[in-house]
């Protein structure tokens, strides 16, 4: 194990925690508010480790949805974007032992993916870097959820504090350094043009999947065209 890249992954995850921690606290508060016991809320964060899916599940429980099959399907649809992230990292992960593949796949969230891709662009893929980032973000998510469950009786709605802006700001900080060439800029613009109007007219979170697939297709075509010309 290359400790240098492991600790680099941990270090570069710290700024991202600014956006993760408030949402972890909110997740804990909301879970307790809908009737989950504190240990159940913490167990969800430890076993699921997917903020968007947890918020969907908690909201459905709060609305009285009792069918676990429906909740599971809804959370799977929300996390379909992980198929795209996994497909991109598959050529690197498939070189690793199965146990490492499973561990890194479990810890693959949006923030870890963005940091890992940035590291690939700079120095190449490092499983140690991805593991360090995953552990740092997993720990911060679990601890912030625990804080939320303990503070649930004192905080009515943390989103009233405006902390919901922290996560979009975090993703913008991760995205902007990646816009270095014509292809990445065009892919970004395609995704933006599609996602903004479709979010107004398409129910649920399907607009995310549609925009991601469309932008990926355009990016693949443009990147392939440039390689052919070269």
Image (tube, grey):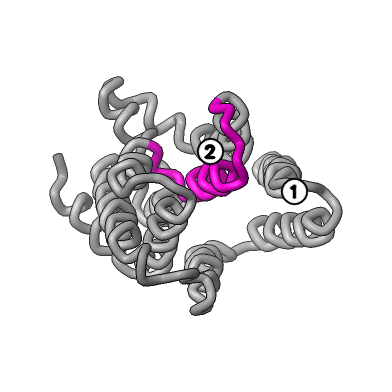
Residue 169 can be seen in this image: no
Q: In terms of sequence position, does the residue under pointer 2 or pointer 1 come before the other? A: 2
- The residue at 28%/61% (across/down) is 150
Q: Quadrant of the N terminus?
A: top left
Asked if residue 27 lies in the magenta stretch, the reply is no
Task: Find disc 1 in the rendering and name its residue.
Answer: 207
User: Are the residues flagged by discs 2 and 1 in contact, CB closer than 8 Å?
Assistant: no
| Residue shown at the point (50%, 66%) measured from the top left | 167
- Percent position (x, y) of residue 128? 24, 44
Give the image quarter of residue 7: bottom left
Q: Is 212 on the left or on the right of 126, as rendered?
A: right
At which x and y percent is residue 188? 68, 60
Toward which corner of the image does residue 140 lie, by quadrant? bottom left
Question: Magenta stretch: residue 59 in it?
Answer: yes
Give the magenta range.
48-68
Could you tell me which secondary element the residue under label 2 belongs to? helix
- What label sits on residue 71 in the rendered view? none
Relative image position of residue 11 (x, y in whole percent): 24, 63
Q: Is residue 127 above or below residue 11?
A: above
Q: Give the overall secondary structure of the magenta segment.
A: helix
* Vertical placement of residue 144 versus 113, above or below: below
Farthest residue, direction bottom: 161
- Residue at 28 percent of width and 55 percent of height: 146
Residue, disc 2: 82
């Amino acid at each position: 194990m290359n400790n240098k890249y492991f600790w680099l992954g941990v270090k570069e995850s710290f700024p991202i925690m600014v956006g993760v921690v408030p949402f972890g606290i909110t997740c804990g508060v909301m879970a307790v508010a809908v009737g989950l016991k504190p240990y159940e809320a913490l167990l969800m964060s430890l076993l699921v480790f997917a903020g968007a899916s947890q918020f969907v599940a908690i909201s459905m429980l709060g609305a009285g949805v009792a069918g676990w099959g429906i909740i599971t399907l809804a959370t799977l649809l929300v996390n379909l974007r992980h198929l795209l992230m996994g497909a991109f990292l598959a050529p690197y992960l498939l070189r690793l032992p199965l146990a490492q593949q499973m561990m890194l796949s479990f810890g693959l969230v949006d923030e870890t993916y963005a940091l890992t891709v940035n590291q690939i662009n700079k120095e190449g893929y490092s499983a140690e870097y991805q593991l360090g980032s995953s552990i740092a973000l997993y720990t911060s998510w679990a601890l912030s959820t625990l804080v939320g469950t303990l503070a649930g009786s004192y905080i009515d709605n943390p989103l009233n504090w405006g902390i919901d802006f922290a996560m979009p700001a975090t993703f913008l900080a991760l995205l902007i350094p990646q816009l270095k060439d014509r292809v990445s800029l065009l892919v970004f613009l395609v995704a933006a043009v599609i996602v903004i109007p479709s979010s107004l007219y398409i129910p649920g979170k399907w607009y995310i999947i549609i925009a991601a697939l469309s932008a990926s297709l355009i990016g693949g075509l443009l990147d392939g065209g440039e390689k052919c010309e070269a």
